[in-house]
Image (tube, rainbow, N blue to C red):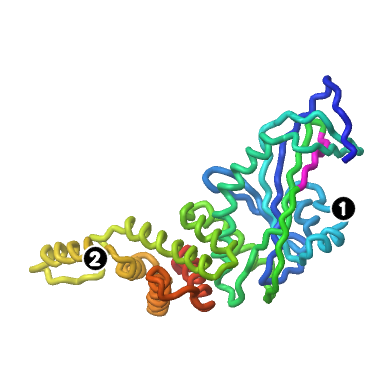
Amino acid sequence: MGLQPLSSAHRLTAVFHSLHVYEIRGFTLEAPSLEPISGSVADFAYALSVGSSVNAICRRIVQDNYADSEEEWQKEHKCTPPYLIVHFGPTAEHESIGSHAKEEGRTITTYDSFSDARAELKTVEDKVLPSLLSALACSFSSNDQPIRFVPTDHTFFGITPDSRTVLDFRLLVSASGYVSSKFEPTQIEGRLSAAVNLANVMKPKVARFFQLALDEDDPLKKFLYFFLAIEIETHATFNRIDHATKLSVLINAPDRVAVSAQNFFDGQRERWVNLHDRFVWCVLCVWTHLCDADVVQFKRLKKFRDGIAHGSIATPPHSAVAGAEKLAAKLQLPPT
């Protein structure tokens, strides 16, 4: 690799950043880059931007190009714009544990010399990315065509105290066919902002299963992961409802039996332990953006889930997988 031994007096330190690049499949965008948006998940900070040029996006986020030749980079990764780039960092300052390096101008290349910096960034990435990518999928889910954020590339780099760059690249590649719709920059910016807000409040368990579903190719696993996201969200929402207050609003009992009616329906509610009853009650009380059609869809999806659990169904139909994804995303969107 052309690395040379470092002298014992040479102390190489840097703060580190990582960039995750995703090819966006499902809409087109002509703007080279949109204004970056910052957010946090579990107090871990990140920034993101979207555009048709990875270099233009990176100049906005880290004031440098991503690739020497964007055209060659696109050929190598077999990808097309637009792109999403998520930025993490800077880390604390870390010292190289390696004994070799290569210096070319203002760039220093090392080999596996900053494992602690990688571990620090991975902790942040593992906390943020499942919630953020799930929130993005939910925020863009209202489009007729599904929007996919496909992992395409990932780079890890450092900046020394004298502003030289320490490079260490790792790659992720994926490819498949898709259909795109045209989005205006203002539409994209609005949905990105909504996703950043959602990522900060999305339940970690829901985000975990939602992200597992997004990454899964097997239709059975994909369906079950999305249904788990629905199930966890339903139970969590049900448990935080002020049931007595909601019952008093929905049930207009005569004054002469107001207390008896309240006690009666409180007793009924305590027996609502099955998923279907809890889902309907959440629709009545909290999910005001859902309607009868969503309840019918839930019942249909639950039949497929039960069929899988009982061994009568081996693989759910494509419509069930798509329906589970759409409903799981809809539960995360704020009531309208």
Q: Is residue 298 visible?
A: no
**Under tag 2, what secondary structure?**
helix
Residue found at the very far left of the displayed protein = 256
Q: What segment is highlighted magenta in the picture?
A: 163-169
Kind of residue at badge 2: Leu
Q: Chief secondary structure of the magenta span?
A: strand
Drawn side of residue 262 relative to residue 46, left or right:
left
Drawn side of residue 181 relative to residue 7, left or right:
left
Residue found at the very far front of the displayed protein = 311
Residue with the mark numbered 1: 68
Residue 150, percent across and down? 67, 62
Q: Quadrant of the N terminus?
A: top right
Mark 2 or 1, nearer chain start: 1
Q: Quick check: marks 2 and 1 in contact, CB under 8 Å? A: no
**Under tag 1, what secondary structure?**
loop
Tell me where residue 15 sits by quadrant.
Answer: top right
Drawn side of residue 323 relative to residue 133, left or right:
left
Above or below, 168 relative to 69: above
Residue found at the very far top of the displayed protein = 9
Residue 21, percent across and down? 71, 56
Q: In the image, what residue occupies the spot 80% across and 55% down?
A: 55
Tell me where residue 216 sits by quadrant.
Answer: bottom right
Residue 2, percent across and down? 90, 38
Residue 126, percent across and down? 58, 47
Above or below, 140 relative to 14: below
Q: CA distance from mark 2 to mark 1?
A: 63 Å
Q: Is residue 162 magenta?
A: no
Kind of residue at badge 1: Asp
Find residue 247 and name its label: 2
